[in-house]
Image: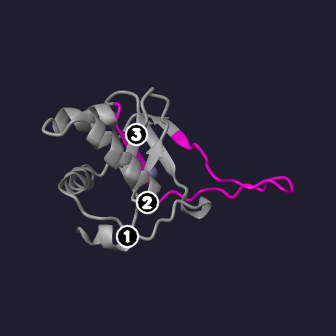
């Protein structure tokens, strides 16, 4: 699992390993507040710094789901955070969990000449399968 640091050319540190493993276990997008309440051994600023480093190295992507706090989710293997790696997210308004919907096809958009997408905020919201049962 720590191969990811080798692939992304990032030094492996105990904090990075902890945060990475934590995100990997959850398979969901999580806010800094949520992560820090679970990883209470680590101070908030080192978690934040680690997440920022992960974003810079394309290990993690951020999601603005309208809940007011930025959420972080692990990127899939081979993700370069390019427009071709964009995917929908789903925000559950009941449990406030945010999921990456990796299997949902993203419609292609034809932009006017000269426009280039670098980011898209594709968030669907409603009830997740846990809250809907
Ligand atoms: Zn839910
Ligand atoms: Zn995602």
Badge number at residue 71: 3
Badge number at residue 65: none
> Which residue occupies 49% across, 29% down?
66
Label 3 or label 2, whichever comes before in sequence order: 2
Indicate left or right for 125 with 83 as reference. Answer: left
- Indicate the quadrant where residue 41 lies: top left
x and y percent of residue 123 in the render? Answer: 52, 40
Structural distance between the alpha carbons of marks 3 and 2: 16 Å
Return the residue nearer the eye: 24 or 42: 42
Verify CB contact (< 8 Å) between mark 3 and mark 2. no
- Does the magenta run of residues contain 107? yes
Q: Quadrant of the N terminus?
A: bottom left
Q: Secondary structure at mark 1?
A: loop
Instruction: Please state the extent of the stretch shown in magenta in the rendering.
Output: 96-123
Return the residue nearer the eye: 41 or 73: 41
Q: Secondary structure at mark 3?
A: strand
Indicate left or right for 95 with 13 as reference. Answer: right
Verify CB contact (< 8 Å) between mark 2 and mark 1. yes
Badge number at residue 57: 2
Label 3 or label 1, whichever comes before in sequence order: 1
Local packing at callout 2 (Cα closer than 10 Å; few below 14, some 14-19, many 20+) is: some
Structural distance between the alpha carbons of marks 2 and 1: 8 Å
Q: Which residue is mark 1?
A: 9
x and y percent of residue 28 in the render? Answer: 32, 47
- Does the magenta run of residues contain 48? no
Q: Main secondary structure of the magenta part?
A: loop
- Indicate the quadrant where residue 83 lies: bottom right
> Which residue occupies 37% across, 70% down?
9
Label 2 or label 1, whichever comes before in sequence order: 1
Q: Establish whether ligand 2 lies closer than 8 Å to the Cβ of label 1.
A: no
């Amino acid at each position: 699992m720590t191969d990811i640091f080798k692939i992304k050319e990032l030094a492996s540190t105990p904090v990075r390993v902890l945060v990475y493993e934590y995100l990997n276990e959850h398979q969901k997008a999580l806010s800094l507040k949520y992560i820090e309440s679970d990883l209470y051994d680590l101070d908030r600023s080192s978690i934040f710094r680690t997440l920022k480093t992960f974003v810079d190295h394309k290990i993690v992507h951020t999601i603005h789901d309208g809940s007011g706090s930025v959420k972080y989710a692990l990127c899939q293997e081979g993700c370069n955070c390019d427009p071709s790696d964009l995917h929908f997210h789903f925000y559950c308004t009941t449990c406030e969990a945010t999921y990456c919907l990796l299997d949902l096809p993203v419609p292609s958009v034809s932009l006017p000449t000269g426009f280039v997408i670098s980011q898209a905020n594709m968030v669907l919201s409603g009830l997740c399968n846990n809250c809907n049962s």
